[in-house]
Each structure stands twice: as C-alpha cells, then as structure tokens.
Image (cartoon, helix red, strand yellow):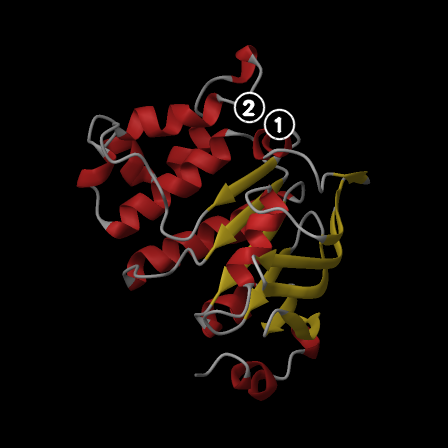
C-alpha cells in the first residue's frame, strides 16, 4: 500500500505541495483530481522519485522510499506513465517495450502476453517506430511499457489527454481489468471528470497544492468536485 504523509515540495522558492497526504491500496483505483497547475504532476513525480520532497514521507509496502532514486523505486514495483507519454520516438514499439526490462531480473525479461491482450494494436505494430504511432497508440505503448516492469503500483498521469474517445474506452477497460486482478494499486491523475468518476474507488482533489476534498466514490458530491476542476 502507498501512503503519502504530509508532503511538502518546492521548486526554488515556490511551494507546489503543502502537507499533502493520501493512500492507495491494491485492488483499487485512487484518483487525484484538480485543474491545471495545482500540483497533481508534482505529486506524481514525488511519488516515483523524479522530484525531491522537502518534508513528509512517502511509504510503500511499509518502507520509507522518500529518498530512494527512481530506479530503486521501480525495482520495488512502482511504475510511472508520465503526462505526455515520453516514449522513445526512434525506437520500435518492440524496443520501447523492452526498455521496461531495466528493473527486472534476467528470468523476467520478457513481454507478457497480457499486454497484447489489453492493447492488441501493439502486437500489430511491433516493428513500427514509436514516433510513427498516433497519440492514442503511443499512450497504449507507454502503459504497456510500464506493465512490462510487473508493477505493484501503477501511476498514470492524465492518460486520456489528447486521446480519441475509442482509445479512452480501451484505456478505461484496461485499468478496470488491472484493478480486478486485486494485486495492483492504481493511482490515476485526471482532468476528464467522467472518466475518473467511473473508475475511482477513492478520490483526492487538489487545489493550490493541498488536498481540499477526499473520500470514496460513494461519498463523492459531483458538484463540489467539479467546482475545483473548472477554470
């Protein structure tokens, strides 16, 4: 289980996160919501180790990982699908997926068939360069690359951004399937409210770097959440 406890994060003199706490459990989708610029991506980068925190703790599986490097967190089962996808445009789809081998033991360095079951288009395009794929296909590739690492925590930063509706549905089905396996915690950042609402088990709303609303999907008051997501 992931526990973020009273985390502060600064960029120089500017404070991006203010005492943020949240939890994400296996078998659940935990959604982080909020408008642009409120600290959602900063929080994700802190969790995966791309941005240092100045106060608080990040606990994963009862261990404090706050000071661990990103590669060390990856070896502990934390995978990140960043906003903007960040696939390697000149590598083939197959080679992009193989970059997920880095944190794995040699015996585990293969691409699970499950990834092609979730995203069949990737199997059809293994020889294509990543940069030649559409935005939606690149998003599927980025998620597939993360799944190659056999994560226990999957962090998804705005996976629906700029994606066509048909692929948004495919991504939603994949997230629902992964949740149903029961052994993975999924942390999802979203601005597309309906997508998040339909998937969320628990939610946290950020505003100005702080959690202003949180609860279960059953307790969510849609009007209150939308107020913090509109510009």
Outermost residue toward the front in this view: 13
Residue position for label 2 = 103
Image marks 2 and 1: residues in contact by CB distance under 8 Å: yes
Q: x and y percent of residue 10 in the render?
A: 61, 58
Query: Which mark is first along the chain, 1 or 2?
Result: 1
Where residue 201 sits, quadrant-wise, is bottom right
Q: Nearer the viewer, residue 207 or 159?
A: 207
**Residue 123 position (above or below residue 36):** above
What residue occupies the far right of the structure in this picture? 62
Give the Cα separation between the discs numbered 2 and 1.
5 Å
Please identify the quadrant where the C terminus is shown: bottom left
In this rendered view, identify the residue nearer to me: 176 or 211.
211
The relative height of residue 19 versus residue 64 in the rendered view (above or below) is below
- Which residue sits at x=45%, y=69%? 191
Q: Dot 2: what SS?
A: loop
Q: State the image coordinates of residue 161 (x, y, percent, origin top left).
A: 36, 61
Residue 195 image offset from top left, x and y in percent: 46, 67
As displayed, is residue 162 above or below residue 143? Answer: below
- Give the left or right position of residue 145, taking residue 152 as reference: left
- Pick whichever, 199 or 90, lies toward us: 90
The answer to whether residue 54 is above or below residue 138 is below
Residue occupying image coordinates x 24% and y 32% = 124
Numbered circles on residues, count: 2
Residue located 36% across and 42% down the image: 86
Where does label 1 land, which residue? 75
Secondary structure beneath label 1: helix
- Depth check: 194 or 95 in front? 95
């Amino acid at each position: 289980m992931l526990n973020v406890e009273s985390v502060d994060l600064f960029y120089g003199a500017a404070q991006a996160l203010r005492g943020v706490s949240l939890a994400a459990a296996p078998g659940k989708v935990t959604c982080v919501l909020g408008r642009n610029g409120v600290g959602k991506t900063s929080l994700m980068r802190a969790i995966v180790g791309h941005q240092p925190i100045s106060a608080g703790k990040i606990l994963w599986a009862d261990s404090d990982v706050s000071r661990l490097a990103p590669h060390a967190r990856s070896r502990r089962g934390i995978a990140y699908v960043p906003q903007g996808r960040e696939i390697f445009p000149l590598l083939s789809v197959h080679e992009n997926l193989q970059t997920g081998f880095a944190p794995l033991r040699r015996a585990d360095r293969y691409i699970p068939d499950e990834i092609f079951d979730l995203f069949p288009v990737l199997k059809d395009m293994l020889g294509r360069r990543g940069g030649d794929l559409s935005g939606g296909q690149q998003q599927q590739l980025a998620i597939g690359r993360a799944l190659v690492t056999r994560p226990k925590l999957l962090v998804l930063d705005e996976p629906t951004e700029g994606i066509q509706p048909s692929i948004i549905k495919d991504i939603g089905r994949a997230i629902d399937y992964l949740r149903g396996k029961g052994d993975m915690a999924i942390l999802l950042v979203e601005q597309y409210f309906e997508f998040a609402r339909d998937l969320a088990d628990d939610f946290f709303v950020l505003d100005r770097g702080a959690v202003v609303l949180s609860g279960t999907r059953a307790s969510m008051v849609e009007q209150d959440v939308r107020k913090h997501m509109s510009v």
